Image: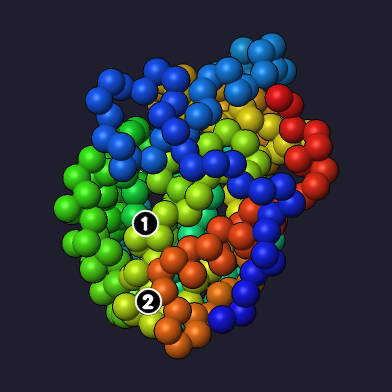
Amino acid sequence: MRTARAAARGAPPPAARPAAGAPAGAAWWVPRSPCGPGCRPRGAPAVGAGRLAARLGALLAVLAATPLLLPALASRRWRGRAVRTWSRAVLRGLGVRLAVRGAPPARATLVVANHISWLDVVALLAVLPSARLVAKREVRGWPVVGWLAGRAGTLFLERDRPRALPAVVAAAGERLRAGAPVACFPEGTTWCGPVGGRFRPALFQAAVDAGVAVLPVRVGYRQADRPTRQPAFVGSDTFAASLHRIAATPALTVTVSLRPTLYPAPGATRRTLSRAAEAAVHAAVPVADLAHLPT
């Protein structure tokens, strides 16, 4: 295997622990992030009321035009273009600039990314529109993102039912063998910081079974060329509150960095793949971001 750099600039935090405010009796196997609303700085700059209204209006216009894409989404030939167009229109409507580093591989891969916000889903589909997502079941009920995820052929995972996981892994493997890339967030939950949680190895089994490569992807957010935690969807956040906060954030950029592809060697396991991919994603965080990210 082409190994990624051994460690990130700054080691990953310890294994996730239950977040403040986590529901009592939550399943121990469900990943939990220690991040919460307190991770975001208070009094962050915001656009004026007029611009905020314009952005939300633009998003509503995109949603209103969505039915026009239904025939294209049902077509194997045009689906990718429709997903890319829709995703980028959502980002533009919210005033979010998209920056892409690297180029996607030509062959089907298991795409694995860090997880900060629901906006990660939109950004990934804007760059890799042919990818089939693996997402938690709750995403299906989210406005905007849930609709697109469903139409894009997302595999929904019930995190509180571990017995359902093998079926999702098997379905992901089938799609990979059929030549379709599959994208997932192996941290299992969202994190507010530049270096998040450990990558859970389960979904990497799909790449092992299908004999395909792994594409590590780093998603990051910047405001006026400085790292920001404003888009983080953590703690008791609601989708409506998060959407309003993102639309109100000026000069917001989401960067999708496609890291070098990892090619499994004979005998590679899901654990070795997950550790290599985790290191590659964390290593993509610039030292300057670690130094200047607000605490």
The residue pinned by badge 1 equals 133
Assess disc 1: are there few (<14), some (14-19) or many (≥20) residues with their C-alpha within 10 Å of its C-alpha: many
Q: How many marks?
A: 2
The amino acid sitting under disc 2 is Val
In terms of image quadrants, where is residue 55? Answer: top right
Which tag, 1 or 2, sits closer to the chain's start? 1
Q: Nearer the viewer, residue 182 or 14?
A: 14
Which residue: 81% across, 37% down?
291
Secondary structure under tag 2 reads helix
Can residue 249 be seen here? yes
Q: Position of residue 24 (x, y in %)?
A: 28, 20
Quarter of the picture holding the N terminus: bottom right
* Distance in Å between CA atoms under marks 1 and 2: 18 Å
The amino acid sitting under disc 1 is Leu
Q: Position of residue 191 (x, y in %)?
A: 53, 37
Q: Is residue 284 above or below residue 181?
A: above
Which residue: 44% across, 20% down?
20
Which residue: 36% across, 23% down?
22
Q: Nearer the viewer, residue 23 or 211?
A: 23
The residue pinned by badge 2 equals 208
Q: Position of residue 288 (x, y in %)?
A: 82, 43
